């Protein structure tokens, strides 16, 4: 008897799912997921920019200048076939009793693109430029700096901004 009552309830229009309502439900989930994804991406980009602004506001020294760093980056760009570095902003800061040149700019790199091979991409990043002696110091401070490229005269290190912002 209970089974018949349950089947009678399923036959009522309130419990039936039509194809039309199922499609609307799927579209709602897809739109909701897209909005959530876009919101998270926007939040992460704004958070990154805020941390960049906080760290770069600690600019203390005039040397090396933007022109000098452009010359050094040209040398590095000629040595590497993996990356292409550019400068948008510069901050020469004091960190753990060392002068560190932080650079915010585009970094070009090859990315795997599946069947079509590698494609060239570009992303904004914060990195540090170091000569050979400062390069050793940065290697010992691996909690903040991560080697990206070692050239014959200069090295590039990725900078862990969140740690640098907390401890500077």
Image (cartoon, rainbow, N blue to C red):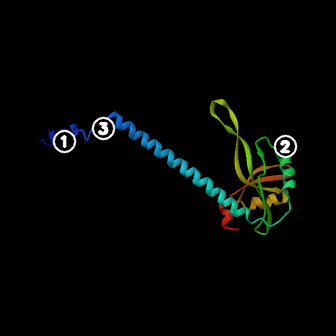
Examine the rendered structure and indicate whether residue 47 appears above or below residue 120.
below
Judge depth for marks 2 and 1 and give the one in front. 1
Name, please, the residue furthest toward the bottom. 97
Is 168 placed left or right of 29 in the picture? right
The residue indicated by pointer 3 is 17
Q: CA distance from mark 2 to mark 3?
A: 64 Å
Examine the rendered structure and indicate whether residue 143 appears above or below residue 27.
below
Examine the rendered structure and indicate whether residue 2 appears above or below residue 57.
above
Residue 89: mark: none
Residue 78: mark: 2
88 or 77, which lies in front? 88
Q: CA distance from mark 2 to mark 1?
A: 76 Å
Q: Which of the two discs, 2 and 1, labels the residue nearer the N terminus?
A: 1
The residue indicated by pointer 1 is 6
Residue at 50 percent of width and 49 percent of height: 36
Q: Position of residue 165 (x, y in %)?
A: 68, 64
């Amino acid at each position: 008897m209970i089974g018949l009552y349950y089947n009678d309830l399923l036959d009522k229009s309130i419990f039936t799912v039509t194809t039309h309502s199922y499609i609307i439900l799927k579209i709602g989930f897809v739109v909701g997921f897209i909005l959530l994804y876009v919101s998270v991406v926007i939040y992460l980009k704004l958070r990154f920019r805020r941390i960049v602004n906080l760290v770069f506001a600690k600019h203390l020294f005039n040397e090396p200048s933007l022109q000098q760093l452009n010359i050094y980056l040209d040398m590095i760009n000629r040595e590497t076939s993996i990356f292409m570095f550019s400068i948008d902003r510069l901050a020469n800061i004091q960190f753990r009793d060392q002068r560190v040149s932080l650079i915010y700019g585009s970094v070009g790199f090859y990315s795997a693109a599946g069947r079509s091979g590698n494609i060239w991409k570009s992303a904004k990043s914060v990195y540090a430029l170091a000569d050979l002696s400062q390069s050793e110091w940065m290697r010992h401070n691996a909690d903040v700096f991560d080697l990206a490229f070692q050239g014959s005269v200069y090295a590039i290190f990725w900078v862990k901004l969140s740690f640098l912002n907390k401890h500077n």
